[in-house]
Image: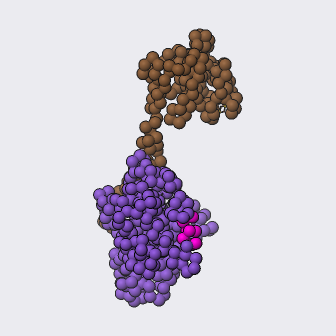
Amino acid sequence: MGRDPDLGRRDFLNTATTLVAGAGLAAAAWPFISSMNPSSNVLARASTEVDLSNITPAEVRTVAWQGKPVFVFHRTLEQIAAMAQSLGSDKDPEPDAERVQRPEWLVVIGLCTHLGCVPNRKPHGWDCPCHGSVYDNSGRILKGPAPRNLDLPPYEFLAADRLLIKKA
Amino acid sequence: MDRRIVQWIDRRFPLTAFIKKELTGYPTPRNLTSWWNFGFLAGFMLVLQIVSGIFLAMHYKADAGLAFDSVEHIMREVNYGWLIRYLHSTGASAFFAIVYIHMARSLYYASYHEPRELMWWSGQLLLLLLMATAFMGYLLPWGQMSYWGAQVITNLFRATPFIGDEVVLWLRGDFAIGDATLTRFFVFHFLFPFLIFGVVFLHLVALHYVKSSNPTGLELSPKDQIPFHPYYTIKDLYGLGWFLIVFCYFVFFQPELFIEPENNVPANPLQTPPHIVPEWYFLPFTPSCALFPTCWAEWRP
Ligand code: HEM
Ligand code: FES
């Protein structure tokens, strides 16, 4: 028995209809998915400007950037010199010079790279209260479960005493 | 799907048998016209209202101090929030239009006759639940129309013999429509569509037991029945295409047609707007207001 000559045509129409309907459904789903992303008012506060003129040497100012803490650390000459001596630990060795734009200002995201707690300030750097990770004054991981040095946010200096932590 | 997976399921759950009985083998009159599309469309609208409603609820705040602004936030700042809200507000009107046509079909073709009386009565219950849902949803944007509409309708309950005042106070949870009213309306507005879903299920259980009516008004012999799938799945989807063309015209080009301008003014308990009108889908019931003197006094269309 010969094949129905119409079958190829029907298969084509079936496939084409299904594809068009699938594309339509996907297009209709997009606005709903997109509505769960940050809205424009949230995006509008995605960058933070910091006035550096009243952060005294050795002081750490914690500012909010995209709802997260950022440590803005005004380092003294001794602290800078000490940090230039080492690469941190074997875990994530990194020269201090690559972690700062200006040596007197360390700007790091204040969330432990282990599971995201906010480390507490200590003379040697920061200690995480959650599982005991220890960071130095360059925000580099020394010991504990954290895998990486504290992350750096994208930032630039607008003037000598004005810092802009930017949108990524 | 792999035949072995289907067989595994079929030994434990009547999947294939169910699909055969209710879909691929379900006997449907071969002479149904497009008027029989509207039940399916009503089901589609229920799903669309639930989906758009859930996404609105992710950004909406049910608090008298925040509600109005949160709807503006949805309109201006949430990605596609305007679209989701217009789908929902236009969807309410479309839902009623479809349900009214569906009911008109039932009346004209006597679809409510023996043995389909319970189809009619479960449908009546669905209409009541739908009206309650839409009425409570309309308070949520907390505009002037929202507020005074709720004021007037809750006042209807003042006609309850002996305890009218107490009933109204209880419904509102406040001396006037207020924060307590808004919060409970939001909870019920969220809940009721799922009750509707349950009653729709019962409506369909009854339908598949008594089978569809048809334009002749006679019971057809088996040779005049055709399987629901593919014939009526295709017909329903084809009708959905036409419906969506009309619906999208209103959503994208005339969305404010179904939102009273006055409702873009935040609710003010101390001032009623000059013209209070119900949504068009409640107009058929407006004359019944005359039965309730307190209602009539406050609500002159
Ligand atoms: C039977 C289905 C439904 C109907 C007929 C309906 C009807 C309405 C109406 C008439 C409004 C006012 C529209 C406006 O002026 O903007 C509204 C608002 C709202 N509804 Fe629904 N709704 C339904 C289902 C749902 C569901 C399932 C949810 C949530 C799970 C929901 C959540 C909301 C929210 C958050 C608002 C306030 C936002 C706004 O006003 O646009 N709705 N609804
Ligand atoms: S989160 Fe900081 S050590 Fe675990």
The one of B85 and B114 positioned closer to us in this rendering:
B85
Please report the residue visible at 45 percent of the width from the left and 78 percent of the height from the top.
B292
The one of B195 and A159 positioned closer to us in this rendering:
A159
Give coordinates of residue A30: x percent, y percent. Answer: 41, 50
- Examine the residues drawn in magenta and state their main secondary structure: helix
Q: How is the image coloured?
A: by chain
Q: Confirm whether residue B190 shows in the render.
A: no
Please report the residue visible at 55 percent of the width from the left and 23 percent of the height from the top.
A72
Please report the residue visible at 43 percent of the width from the left and 19 percent of the height from the top.
A159
Give coordinates of residue B123: x percent, y percent. Answer: 47, 77
Q: Quadrant of residue A93?
A: top right
The one of B103 and A19 positioned closer to us in this rendering:
B103
Colour of chain A as rendered: brown
Colour of chain B as rendered: purple
Q: Quadrant of residue A138?
A: top right
Up/down of A69 relative to B203, above or below: above
Quadrant placement of the C terminus of chain B: bottom left
Up/down of B254 relative to A63, above or below: below
Q: Confirm whether residue B291 shows in the render.
A: yes
Residue closest to the far front? B270
Q: Is residue A66 left or right of residue A78?
A: left
Range shown magenta: B166-173
Up/down of A15 relative to B166, above or below: above
Q: Is residue A119 left or right of residue B87?
A: right
Please report the residue visible at 67 percent of the width from the left and 22 percent of the height from the top.
A122
Q: Is residue B171 magenta?
A: yes
Picture mark count: 0
Up/down of A44 relative to B134, above or below: above
Give coordinates of residue B83: x percent, y percent. Answer: 38, 54
Q: Is residue A57 magenta?
A: no
Give coordinates of residue A140: x percent, y percent. Answer: 61, 22
